[in-house]
Image (cartoon, rainbow, N blue to C red):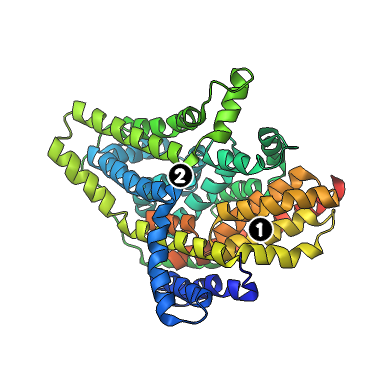
Amino acid sequence: MTDYGFWSLIPPLLAIGLAIKTKQVVFSLSLGIFVGYLIIQGGNVFEGFLSTISAFVEVFQSKGNTRTIVLTLIIGALIQLIKYSGGINGFINWVQKKLSGQQNLKGKIQATSALTGFLIFVESNISILTVGTIFRPLFDKHKIPREKLAYLADSSSAPSCVLFPLNAWGAYVMGLLLAFPSLDPFKTLVYSIPFNFYAILTLVFVFWLSFSGREYGEMKKTAERYNESNDEKSHTENATSSPLNMVIPIAVMVLSMPFFLIYGGWDPSLAGGFADKVWNSISNGSGSEAVLNACFTGFLVAAIMYFFQKMLTIKTFIDQSFKGMNEMVVMAVLMVLAFAIGNLCNELGTGIYVSRVTSAWLIPEVAPALIFVISGFIAFATGTSWGTFAIMISIGVPLSFAVDANIYLVISAVLGGGVFGDHCSPISDTTLIASVASGCDHIDHVRTQLPYALFTGALSIVFYLIAGFIF
């Protein structure tokens, strides 16, 4: 890989800074990508322009990227079918009936949305899209800022995903750990969970903020403006039906994901008992393929249910499906740009440069805290937690052996740091999805979430420093 040194930081930082300044995310990402390929092409504007166009096409060369983009469209179609069936209104009415007359209604609505995001731990995009879309009408009705919904959706999804090994995240991390024969991937991942301070603290903070009703910084200012000027922003379909019309398709989607993950990686020729084959299948399976298959299954179950209830005809099924997909087109474009700038950062060696420059600082006791900070910065600059995992696990594991640092602390610091940086980054795909799904301005979501993420991130650094000297 060509070492572009400090130049490798310029494209992502330019895109981030410009997005915050102008609030034009598509333009900012596109310009950042163009500047990156201008650097790669040695300042040749024409070649940089052609490389930028090729970069958008090359996003689809990755099956994982393509599946994620298709997944976004299918989720849009599924949610629209649920809306059309009256399932969302049915679910909202059920929640309101359960909570009616209770004290702290707003807090319980927020906690319910966070709990939903936490329970859909199979995949962060599914979790965010589901929470943002379903709870948006309820938040609007009770004058709770959409920025708060975006925060709850964003900050309950990735932390829960990274704490549970039986999902696409766990499969991906275990796949990275397979590169080290001396480690048992599943055992290493499970033993690192109690030390994933950022994920645990973030979830605690999310539920505390929900129940307490307290807000700080930009979120507090947003809530005050919202209460003063908000009119109900959205409307839902007039139809109302059983909440099961929403719950069953989503439950099928969530519960079938581990099945598809195991099925996709199943190899009967492997040695060991059934449990060993299951763990090996999880490691060998494709997370993105399993999630897409699960999503299609939920979509088909919803369609079949509504056909039997005589809510759908073939024409309305097609029309409503495309209507839902159409609402996700902007998100799909943003994801293409986010993947493209992630590929660019990989080509520039941004993560490798940052980790190489900072690795000289590492000593055993402070190694976990510094690895957390480095992972956070890489995820912030590249907009990808998974890309950060790939970079930092390949560096952190050998480094932990070399300096005799606790391997479980190091792994948890990489995972927690990647999620932390992802939460802070305007160019992260999950941050983009959270703002679009919740119906709020993207940069407003970043500005209101950032203080909360920095707070739990700072606490995590303190915990890693303490744990580094104890363990």
Amino acid type for the residue under numbered disc 2: Ser
Q: Residue 72 location, x and y as percent?
A: 36, 49
Label 1: how many Cα within 10 Å (few below 14, some 14–19, many 20+): many
Q: What residue do we see at 28% from left, 39% from top?
A: 82
Label 2: how many Cα within 10 Å (few below 14, some 14–19, many 20+): many
Left or right of 36? Residue 400 is right
Q: Residue 137 location, x and y as percent?
A: 34, 50
Q: Disc 2 marks which residue?
A: 127
Q: Residue 275 location, x and y as percent?
A: 61, 21
Image quarter (top left, top right, bottom left or bottom right) of the N terminus: bottom right
Is 350 rendered above or below residue 298? Answer: below
Q: Quadrant of residue 320?
A: top left
**Is residue 143 in view from this perspective?**
no
Is 95 rendered above or below residue 466? Answer: above
Label 1 secondary element? helix
Image quarter (top left, top right, bottom left or bottom right) of the C terminus: top right
Q: What residue do we see at 33% from left, 38% from top?
A: 93
Q: Residue 282 location, x and y as percent?
A: 55, 32
Q: What residue do we see at 31% from left, 61% from top?
A: 231
Number of labels in the image equals 2
Foreground of the two, 61 or 408? 61
Amino acid type for the residue under numbered disc 1: Ser
Foreground of the two, 191 or 346? 346
Q: Quadrant of residue 4?
A: bottom right
Disc number for residue 375: 1
